[in-house]
Structures are given as structure tokens and as C-alpha cells.
Image (spheres, helix red, strand yellow):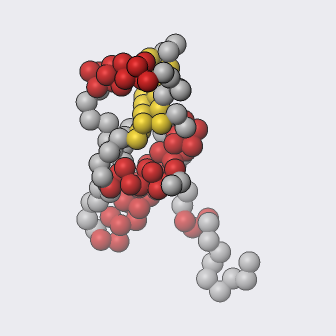
């Protein structure tokens, strides 16, 4: 199963993803947030109704740890955080839990992305 399928299946089942694959899941999180915002804007503009698309249930990134240590880390997470839908949290021995608050890049206007109709670009 691909990382995309893992995140989608977890979101559909309202399950949090716990992974060691920080780079790929951080990218998927950013894409999810960016695309959701864009689609919300487009749907709201077309329908004249505010829209709130679903979020993934959360992503937790940890380094490879012995099982007992991982259990302790997850237990500290449960004791420290409430709902994490749509959030990305990273744990390291040096820093403990940190939320990735990197804002997705602004969504570019479609006007500059597509050639004018009838154009032969």
C-alpha cells in the first residue's frame, strides 16, 4: 500500500497515522491542507455556501524506537494532546513533541496557470 493510500484509508476510518516516514508524510500533510483549502474556496465560490472539507485524523512522526520506548512516547502524546485532526506532530528525543505549523504556500490564482482558451501554447 502506498503512503497516499495509507493516509486516505486512515482518514476514511478516522485513524491517526503513526509513522517513521517523516519526509513523505510531511509532504502529504502539506498537500492535503493546501488542496483542501483551494477546493473549499472553489466550491464556496461556485455554490455561494461556505464549505469545510474533511481533514485527516492526524499524523504522528517518530524516529525508529524500541517498542517499549515507542509505547511510552505515544502514552506521553495521549496525555499531552487533545484531538489532532488535520495536524502533524513530530517527536524527537531532543525536543519532545512539536507540531509542524509550517503554513502551506499560498494557492496561486488559476488565471496564471492556464493558457487562454483558443491559445495554442
Q: Is residue 114 above or below residue 61?
A: below
Q: Camera-side residue: 16 or 41?
A: 16
User: What residue sits 35% from the left and 41% below the top?
Assistant: 16
User: What residue sits 57% from the left and 43% below the top?
Assistant: 24
Q: Residue 27, how many percent across, how many down?
A: 55, 44
Q: Residue 95, how many percent across, how many down?
A: 48, 15
Q: Residue furthest top?
A: 94
Residue 48 appears in the picture as rendered:
yes
Q: Is residue 45 above or below residue 78?
A: below
19 with respect to 71 (left or right): right
5 with respect to 76 (left or right): right
Residue 97 appears in the picture as rendered:
no
Q: Camera-side residue: 56 or 114?
A: 56
- Quadrant housing the C terminus: bottom right
Q: Residue furthest right?
A: 121
State the count of labels: 0
User: What residue sits 37% from the left and 23% below the top?
Assistant: 71
Q: Residue furthest front?
A: 67
Q: Camera-side residue: 42 or 28?
A: 28
Q: Is residue 11 above or below residue 78?
A: below
57 with respect to 8 (left or right): left
Q: Which quadrant holds residue 86? A: top left
Q: Residue 100, how many percent across, how many down?
A: 46, 32
Amino acid at each position: 500500500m502506498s503512503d497516499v493510500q495509507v493516509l486516505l484509508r486512515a482518514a476514511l476510518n478516522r485513524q491517526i497515522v503513526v509513522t517513521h516516514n517523516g519526509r513523505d508524510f510531511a509532504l502529504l500533510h502539506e498537500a492535503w491542507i493546501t488542496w483542501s483549502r483551494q477546493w473549499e474556496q472553489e466550491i464556496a465560490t461556485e455554490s455561494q455556501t461556505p464549505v469545510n472539507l474533511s481533514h485527516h485524523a492526524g499524523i504522528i512522526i517518530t524516529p525508529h524506537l524500541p517498542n517499549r520506548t515507542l509505547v511510552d512516547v505515544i502514552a506521553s502524546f495521549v496525555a499531552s494532546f487533545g484531538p489532532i485532526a488535520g495536524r502533524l506532530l513530530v517527536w524527537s528525543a531532543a525536543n519532545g513533541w512539536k507540531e509542524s505549523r509550517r503554513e502551506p504556500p499560498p494557492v496561486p490564482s488559476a488565471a496564471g496557470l492556464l493558457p487562454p482558451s483558443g491559445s495554442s501554447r
